[in-house]
């Protein structure tokens, strides 16, 4: 790795750390809220899963089992590859990737400090998309019809809407089936949550890890890394991404857990099970189809859906509204910051 590659990769790891901090907290929020698992064991187990999943995916790829469709799509199906031909120096490649990741990090930091809810996934893609538009001087560098318009922009609203509707329906059905059951059913639901916890955390780790690995694919496309397939991606890159997710989870986002588990709606065991099942379904669908979904959006919407199915007035719609506004603003703001970063930093770097 050159010095340029190392700097960009370290920035990617820093953002991956934040994804573990934010996304990992979303994955365990309802399980912790219902006390199915205590906070510390939940965090440590989730952290371990966040490390093992990217590494396990890489090992499976070594055996010819396709496991990284999201990463591949981000690397090849978001920005038209022929635009990369115009990046003919390492400085240009560095300016593009550095600006994109910087744009993502700036909006992530601003939103964290101001407590504006965002989609971490769309912040990452937004920063890179903005830098690409500035670097190549056209919006047409993005593959709008092929993937970006529906798989990225469209899913900002579609995925939460589907998650909310699905969780609402499942909660209504669950209440109809279980309303005569004794309170002992709560014990069963606690155990179901523990199983769902592992499944959901693994799905989150796969989706989040692939987004960072997708940026690594972009780095390879412009010459900052040397590999062509996920199976021959350097192990250090994969382990670095897994390690950053793990450390982010260990640092934990307790305020995020409280918002999902208590502030939107007072989650009980049945709500948690339904929200987990819904979010796992949405996330694994994204993993299989290669769509980089915002899993925090799916979990939040699922909690709202279960709460609305129970008692509409009990849902904190003010908090839900603020979260929705944050989701909607994330992509355009991150793109604007990424583009601005390139216009400033790109000129400085390319003049040196």
Image: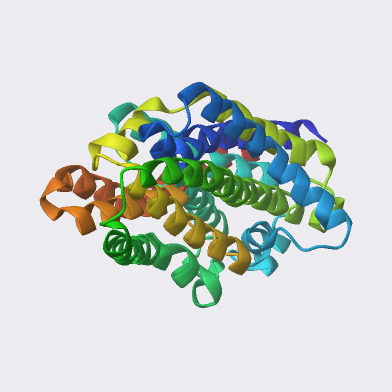
Residue 156 percent location from the top left of the image: 38, 60
The answer to whether 344 is drawn above or below residue 43 in the figure is below
The residue nearer to you, when weighing 21 against 131, is 21
Residue 18 percent location from the top left of the image: 51, 33
Residue 30 appears left or right of 53 = left
Residue 153 appears left or right of 198 = left
The residue nearer to you, when weighing 5 against 298, is 298
Q: In which quarter of the image is residue 171?
A: bottom left
Residue 48 appears left or right of 36 = right
- Which image quarter is the N terminus in? top right
Q: In which quarter of the image is residue 81?
A: bottom right
The residue most toward the left is 313
Q: Can residue 224 be seen in this view?
A: no
The answer to whether 322 is drawn above or below residue 70 in the figure is above
Q: What colour scheme does the image use?
A: rainbow
Residue 105 appears left or right of 159 = right
Q: Can residue 104 be seen in this view?
A: yes
The residue nearer to you, when weighing 342 against 49, is 49
Residue occupying image coordinates x 45% and y 47%: 123
The residue most toward the bottom is 145
Residue occupying image coordinates x 62% and y 66%: 288
How many labels were placed on the picture?
0
The answer to whether 251 is drawn above or below residue 69 in the figure is above
Residue 144 percent location from the top left of the image: 49, 72
- Which image quarter is the C terminus in? top right
Residue 300 percent location from the top left of the image: 34, 48
The answer to whether 336 is drawn above or below residue 290 in the figure is above
């Amino acid at each position: 790795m050159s010095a340029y590659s190392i700097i960009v990769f370290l920035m990617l790891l820093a953002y991956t750390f934040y994804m573990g901090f934010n996304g990992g907290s979303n994955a365990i929020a309802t399980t912790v809220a219902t006390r199915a698992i205590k906070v510390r064991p939940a965090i440590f187990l989730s952290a371990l899963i966040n490390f093992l999943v990217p590494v396990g995916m890489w090992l499976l790829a070594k055996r010819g089992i396709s496991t990284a469709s999201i990463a591949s799509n981000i690397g090849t199906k978001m920005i038209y590859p022929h635009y990369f031909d115009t990046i003919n120096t390492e400085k240009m490649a560095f300016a593009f990737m550095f600006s994109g990741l910087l744009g993502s990090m700036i909006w992530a930091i601003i939103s964290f400090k101001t407590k504006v809810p965002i989609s971490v996934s769309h912040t990452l893609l937004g920063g890179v998309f903005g830098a690409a538009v500035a670097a190549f001087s056209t919006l047409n560098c993005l593959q709008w019809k092929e993937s970006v318009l529906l798989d990225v922009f469209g899913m900002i609203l579609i995925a939460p809407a589907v998650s909310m509707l699905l969780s609402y329906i499942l909660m209504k059905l669950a209440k109809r089936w279980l309303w005569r059951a004794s309170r002992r059913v709560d014990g069963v639901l606690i155990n179901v949550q523990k199983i769902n916890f592992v499944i959901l955390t693994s799905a989150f780790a796969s989706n989040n890890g692939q987004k960072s690995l997708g940026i690594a694919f972009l780095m390879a496309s412009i010459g900052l890394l040397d590999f062509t397939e996920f199976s021959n991606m350097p192990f250090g890159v994969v382990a670095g991404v897994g390690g950053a997710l793990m450390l982010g989870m260990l640092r934990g986002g307790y305020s995020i857990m409280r918002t999902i588990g208590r502030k939107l709606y007072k989650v009980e065991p049945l709500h948690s099970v339904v929200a987990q099942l819904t979010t796992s379904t949405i996330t694994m669908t994204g993993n299989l189809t290669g769509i980089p979904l915002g899993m925090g959006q799916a979990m939040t919407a699922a909690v709202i859906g279960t709460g609305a199915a129970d008692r509409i007035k009990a849902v904190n719609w003010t908090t839900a509204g603020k979260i929705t506004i944050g989701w909607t603003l994330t992509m355009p703001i991150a793109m604007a910051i990424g583009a601005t970063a390139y216009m400033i930093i790109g000129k400085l770097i390319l003049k040196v």
